[in-house]
Image (spheres, rainbow, N blue to C red):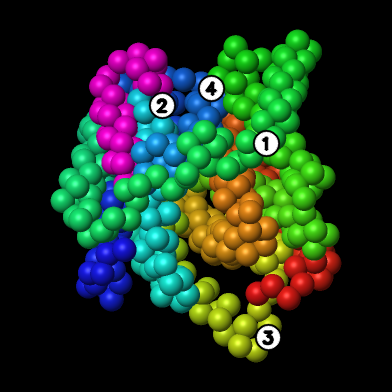
């Protein structure tokens, strides 16, 4: 590993990864802040002019695809490229995607750009985090601190991207905004190339010794027959749903629904296999069952939280008074509230858990999940009242969305980092990588649902909005209460693990 230090007392290589991730997040979140707005804007104003249902489905497919592609992205790095090259190639794909999006043209050109960005992110994101961990082979608190610094880079890039890109896109030209996202990724690539020597030999050699291992160990070689049966079963299920008109894969919404079915079917099959034929002891089975519970909770949480870029973004554009000192703020600017809140309150929440732990009062992981889900529901409860004002024909102030994003951000801090940590601790050692992949699949499912939900917004029928937001309240709060109720049982199943 690199022996150089100097980046807040951490290995010099951390600065390389910090700024690479910062600019990648600048491009990703900057584009995310304008994506559904661009798709639903009339073509006369240089948008695609898609209906809300189609735009929501495309948004959900794209954001879900980003997370799903981390699985093959990790496999390619482990078996073929190595982490260093995977990051480089991923960044190039992202930049090319944004450049394609910057070219005015048909929807097919636009979708091609989205595909490049999704593929590039799938290559870059999981592997840059892997190298961060490799900088600290000794583990311990210093490694945790390193990830905290790295996480700050993520949020700094998110803040900058969601301020600069929407400003250019909404006030000047949509395609200029997409082009600015490409510039951000270009800056990240340049600094990565110039400073990667600080990483030493980390990430150059592929980690896997068996190049034909599937998905970085997601499916063991000896069980490929079972994986083929799973795949055929999923294809058969999709065919049945298509023939019975439950889904229609000839439309964007139908494709999104089909992908949702695929994710659920594969995940359930995987957990069933692990629990029934994975060679686990009874305590390990109980912990895997808890991981499944956390997967469900995370999927529900992200399905609401990720509406920041879909339904809540549309609400900001169409129903929120964004005039401040005589100037109308870009709708995408409100997307920056979340990362600002994370930067401010992450140290506070982290210190709270430490203080409670010293008093033997630290809540269990399921209890924290319950709190996070209830906070998510409370955020949408705020939106119920905001939507009721809209039904009278008035626009609402920005405070409603700011308060919602505040509640969602605190909920994220009680759920997301806790879930990541718990997954690594609860997983049987031989399945840790697979379980981390499943965690990202939960995020993918949540993003997909968020996009499909946004498609239910009908601008001709604003009277439906309070009920739509209330449905999210009932689901998230209900799920949160369930997590609170089962936390005593799961605490026993976790046992003495800390």
Specify start and end residues of the magenta stretch as a single range.
84-112
* Mark 3 to mark 4 CA distance (whole Å): 50 Å
Rendering quarter of residue 291: bottom right
- Disc ID at residue 54: 4
The answer to whether 339 appears left or right of 293 in the picture is left
Earlier along the polypeptide chain: callout 3 or callout 2? 2
- Image vertical order of residue 422 relative to residue 6, above or below: above
The answer to whether 276 appears left or right of 18 in the picture is right
Q: Which residue is mark 1?
A: 222
Earlier along the polypeptide chain: callout 1 or callout 4? 4
Residue that sits furthest to the bottom in the current view = 359
Earlier along the polypeptide chain: callout 1 or callout 2? 2
Q: Which residue is mark 2?
A: 115
User: Residue drawn 60% across and 31% down?
Assistant: 452
Q: Nearer the viewer, residue 286 or 210?
A: 210
- Mark 3: give few (<14), some (14-19) or many (20+) Cα within 10 Å: few
Earlier along the polypeptide chain: callout 4 or callout 2? 4
Instruction: From the top left corner, tell me how far across and down residue 47 is, in percent.
Output: 35, 23
* Quadrant showing the C terminus: bottom right
Q: Nearer the viewer, residue 179 or 52?
A: 179
- Image vertical order of residue 74 relative to residue 22, above or below: above
- Disc ID at residue 360: 3
């Amino acid at each position: 590993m690199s022996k150089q230090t100097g980046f807040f007392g951490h290995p010099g290589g951390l600065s390389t990864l910090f700024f690479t991730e910062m600019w990648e997040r600048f491009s990703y979140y900057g584009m995310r802040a304008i994506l559904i707005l661009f798709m639903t804007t009339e073509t006369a104003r240089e948008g695609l002019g898609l209906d809300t249902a189609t735009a929501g489905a495309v948004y959900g497919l794209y954001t879900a695809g980003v997370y799903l592609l981390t699985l093959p992205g990790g496999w390619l790095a482990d078996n073929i490229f190595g982490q260093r090259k995977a990051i480089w190639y991923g960044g190039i794909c992202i930049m090319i995607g944004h450049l394609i999006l910057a070219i005015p043209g048909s929807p097919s050109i636009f979708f091609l750009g989205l595909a490049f960005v999704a593929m590039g992110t799938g290559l870059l994101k999981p592997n840059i985090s892997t190298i961060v961990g490799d900088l600290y082979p000794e583990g311990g608190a210093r490694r945790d601190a390193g990830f905290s610094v790295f996480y700050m880079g993520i949020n700094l890039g998110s803040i900058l991207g969601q301020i600069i890109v929407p400003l250019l896109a909404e006030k000047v030209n949509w395609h200029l905004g997409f082009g600015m996202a490409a510039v951000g990724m270009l800056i990240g690539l340049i600094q990565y190339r110039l400073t990667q020597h600080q990483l030493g030999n980390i990430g150059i050699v592929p980690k896997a010794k068996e190049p034909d291992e599937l998905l970085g160990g997601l499916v063991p070689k000896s069980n490929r027959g079972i994986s083929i049966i799973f795949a055929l079963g999923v294809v058969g299920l999709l065919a049945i749903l298509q023939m019975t008109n439950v889904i229609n894969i000839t439309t964007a919404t139908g494709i999104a629904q089909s992908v949702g079915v695929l994710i659920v079917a594969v995940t359930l099959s995987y957990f069933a296999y692990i629990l029934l034929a994975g060679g686990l002891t009874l305590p390990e089975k109980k912990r895997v069952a808890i991981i499944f519970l956390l997967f469900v909770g995370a999927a529900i949480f992200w399905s609401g939280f990720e509406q920041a870029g879909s339904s809540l973004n549309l609400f900001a554009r169409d129903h929120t008074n964004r005039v401040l000192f005589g100037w109308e703020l870009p709708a995408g600017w409100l997307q920056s509230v979340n990362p600002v809140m994370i930067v401010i309150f992450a140290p506070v929440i982290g210190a709270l858990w430490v203080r409670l732990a010293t008093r033997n009062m630290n809540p269990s992981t399921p209890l924290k999940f319950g709190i996070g889900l209830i906070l998510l529901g409370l955020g949408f409860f705020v939106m119920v009242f905001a939507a009721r004002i809209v039904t009278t024909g008035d626009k609402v102030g920005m405070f409603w969305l700011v308060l919602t994003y505040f509640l969602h951000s605190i909920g994220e801090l009680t759920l997301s980092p806790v879930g990541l940590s718990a997954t690594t601790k609860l997983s049987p050692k031989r399945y840790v990588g697979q379980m981390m992949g499943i965690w990202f699949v939960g995020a993918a499912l949540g993003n997909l649902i968020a996009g499909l939900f946004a498609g239910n917004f009908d601008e001709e029928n604003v009277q439906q909005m309070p009920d739509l937001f209330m449905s999210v309240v009932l689901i998230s709060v209900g799920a949160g209460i369930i997590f609170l109720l089962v936390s005593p049982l799961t605490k026993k199943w976790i046992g003495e693990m800390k």
